[in-house]
Image: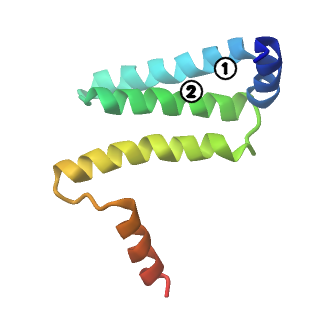
Amino acid sequence: MDVDKILTERGGRYGDFYTQGVITQDLKRMIRRYANDVGTTMAPDQWEALDMICSKISRIVNGDPDYDDSWVDIAGYAQLIVNRLREEQGKFKPLEEQMREAANYSE
């Protein structure tokens, strides 16, 4: 693969990488500062999910807000945490079961 071509495509989709970095780091810094101020503690996967969500938010703000993949990624990182929490609480349901219940609910 041609790296320059990929970077050009991604730059067109997500905006300038430096600016994206500034936005992402500002978001992460703000979240960690407020979490620290109020004494919030989280598991490593929760912090990582928030970090990844911040990165996706900065891509949306700095680039193409209509690129649905960025929004899907945000939902995916959040769902990973929901799945783990529900599994720990004995409330986890496989995706297929959730979809069946949703289909029955809408009828």
Q: For mark 1, does the 10 Å Cα neighbourhood hold few (<14), some (14 to 19), or many (20 or more) residues?
A: many
Q: Is residue 107 above or below residue 39?
A: below
Spatial distance from mark 2 to mark 1, Cα to Cα? 8 Å
Q: Which disc number belongs to residue 46?
A: none
Percent across and percent down for residue 82 are 33, 49
The image's colour scheme reads rainbow
Instruction: Determine the residue positioned at 82% across, 26% down.
Output: 12
- Secondary element under disc 1, as helix, strand or loop, is helix
Residue named by callout 1: 20
Q: Quadrant of residue 15?
A: top right
Task: Judge by depth and name the residue closer to the eye, 90 or 1.
Answer: 1
Q: Is residue 3 above or below residue 105?
A: above
Q: Which disc number belongs to residue 55?
A: 2
Please state which amino acid type lies under the numbered disc 1: Gln
Instruction: Determine the residue positioned at 22% across, 60% down.
Output: 91
Q: For mark 2, does the 10 Å Cα neighbourhood hold few (<14), some (14 to 19), or many (20 or more) residues?
A: many
Q: Quadrant of residue 73?
A: top right
Percent across and percent down for residue 80 are 38, 43
Whether residues under marks 2 and 1 lie with C-beta atoms below 8 angstroms apart, the answer is yes
Instruction: Determine the residue positioned at 53% across, 41% down.
Output: 74
